[in-house]
Amino acid sequence: MDWSRAKSIFIITFLLLNLFLGYQLNEKRDASNISVLLEATLHERLSEMNIAIAVELIEEQITGTYISGSSDLSLETTIDSENPTQQLVEAGDEFVTVELKEPFPLIYNEHNSISVQAQEFIRQQIVNGDEYRFSHFDEELKQIYFYQTYEGKKVDNYESGRFPLLLQLDKKSQVISYEQNYLTIQPIHPQGKEQEVITSIKAIEKLFNEQLIPPDSEINKVELSYFSFFNPLGEVQVFAPMWNIGVNEQVYYVNAIDGAIQNIQ
């Protein structure tokens, strides 16, 4: 073996590898610098048009994917077997209605909100209760509404008009019944793994470039959630990761993977 030739090949290969790695590092640094420059430029343009961002933005790069959800038909038997203080009164294709054998009081005041009390109730008393998040309380109807979540992010469906969990209270603010739908959720990886999603500031920039943020506006909500604009295909529904952005009274949804914009009147 020609050791001198082998040594020369090894040295050349090592130098080429170093050059390649240096090139990759430089490309990443340039991309990062461009991103910072574009972000600074956007903030300047927003400031010039008196557009205020009134919420904290997520700065770090995050990943996401499409997800699918199907109604869990075992909910009926689970309630019967695990909740002796409750009685199943109706089971449909998607929702179950359950009555409490004894009303459960929600004690709330200025120091202990009804959302905290209700969240604690569903965590202790409802199947998969820790996967739901408080939405709002309708004082007139005495109903408390919740979203289902996936990995801590809200799962929402514009077309349904119905919340997956509803608590019904009596006049004494006691829980007397609830309606529940639970989706079994699975991630969908079109490229074999989760993808990097566009940042919150990039989603705002897309709205700005489409002239959807007028001068003297306030961006009052920026939240990453899972959203579906379409009816289920059979028993399965597909949700996309979406930036939910509130501009004054208008709500826009920006697909966090492909950047497509939807709005809700």
Image (tube, grey):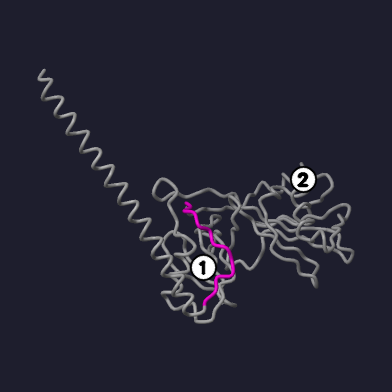
Where residue 155 appears, x then y in whole percent? 59, 58
Q: Quadrant of residue 145?
A: bottom right
Placement of the N terminus among the 4 image quadrants: top left
Examine the residues drawn in magenta and state their main secondary structure: loop
The relative height of residue 209 versus residue 28 in the rendered view (above or below) is: below
Q: Position of residue 46 (x, y in %)?
A: 47, 75
**Along the line of sight, the residue nearer the viewer: 81 or 241:** 241
Q: Nearer the viewer, residue 157 or 14?
A: 14
Left or right: 149 as drawn, with respect to 9: right
Q: Is residue 233 above or below residue 1?
A: below
Q: Which mark is first along the chain, 2 or 1?
A: 2
Residue type at tag 2: Asp
Residue contact between numbered discs 1 and 2, judged by CB atoms under 8 Å: no
The residue at 54%/64% (across/down) is 231
10 Å neighbourhood of mark 1: few (<14), some, or many (≥20)?
many
Image check: 140 left or right of 201? right
Secondary structure beneath dot 2 equals helix
Q: Which residues are magenta?
A: 51-63
Q: Is residue 185 left or right of residue 114?
A: left
Residue drawn at x 72%, y 44% as measured from the top left:
78
Residue 239 in the image, given as x and y percentages of width and height: 52, 58
* Res. 80 mark: 2
